[in-house]
Image (cartoon, rainbow, N blue to C red):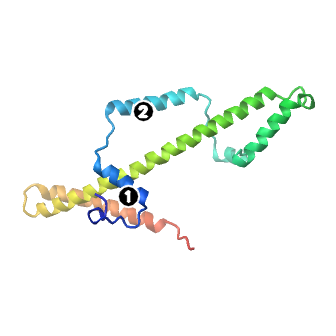
Amino acid sequence: MLPGASTGEFYGRTNSVRRFYCALSRHQHYLSDADLQDIQQAIDTIQQKLPFLISLTLDERKRLYKMGDKRLAFVQNSLNAAQSNRNILPASFDLEGFANDYRLATSLADLLMRLNQLTEQVDDTLLAVGSEAMSSSLTVYDYVKTAAKKTPGLKAIAGQLGNLFKAIKNKSAKAAAEQPVISG
């Protein structure tokens, strides 16, 4: 249960986030082992279809030209000019390679947009579901602490949960303290 969910308050969350959380809360979503295996196989297939993908170092990334949306028109117009006026190019210029690079770059840009969208959705869903699980864990911890006073055998569990919770709180506090302050 999200903080404030019982009162309908979501501490400033937008309507779309409220709808998303409500959809997660009303339905029990899960990935079956078969579905997870299918998804992992689909990712494997994507990687197999893109065997030419590379990894660059930070320095290599800095040295390369970047072709964003604004430069796409420049590259496309350059390719059109080259294809229409082959006679102005030296014989050593690889026009077919240039055309292939352009087609691959635009195809990869389209794929990247879709993959980024999917990654953002997976990340947002993970954050929401993780928050739900953490909230439920805190509720269980409260019940265990209360019950440990009268129920034999729960003190050790309460202690273990307490130690884990303290470690989480300390880590969160340290991370918050390390965040840069941005003034508006």
Residue that appears at 32% across and 32% down: 33
Q: Disc 2, disc 1: CB below 8 Å?
A: no
Name of the residue lying farthest toward the bottom: 184
First in sequence, mark 2 or 1: give its number: 1
Q: Where does the N terminus fall, quadrant-wise?
A: bottom left
Label 2 Cα neighbours within 10 Å, binned few <14 / some 14-19 / many ≥20? few
Confirm whether residue 55 shows in the render.
Answer: no
Residue that appears at 64% across and 47% down: 58
Between residue 76 and residue 48, name the one nearer to us: 76
What amino acid type should be assigned to the residue bearing mark 1? Arg
Image-quadrant location for residue 137: bottom left
Residue receiving disc 2: 39
Q: Where does the C terminus fall, quadrant-wise?
A: bottom right
Q: CA distance from mark 2 to mark 1?
A: 27 Å
104 left or right of 117 in image: right
> Is 10 above or below relative to 70?
below
> Could you say whether the residue bearing mark 2 is in a helix, strand or loop?
helix
> Is 103 above or below relative to 155?
above
141 left or right of 16 in image: left
Confirm whether residue 142 shows in the render.
Answer: yes
Q: Where is residue 176 shown, x and y percent of the image?
A: 44, 66
Residue that appears at 44% across and 48% down: 123
Image-quadrant location for residue 144: bottom left
> Could you say whether the residue bearing mark 1 is in a helix, strand or loop?
helix
Image-quadrant location for residue 3: bottom left
Label 1 Cα neighbours within 10 Å, binned few <14 / some 14-19 / many ≥20? some
Q: Where is residue 60 shown, x and y percent of the image?
A: 68, 44
What amino acid type should be assigned to the residue bearing mark 2? Ile
> Is 152 above or below relative to 38?
below
Residue receiving disc 1: 18
Q: Which mark is residue 8?
A: none
Name of the residue lying farthest toward the right: 88
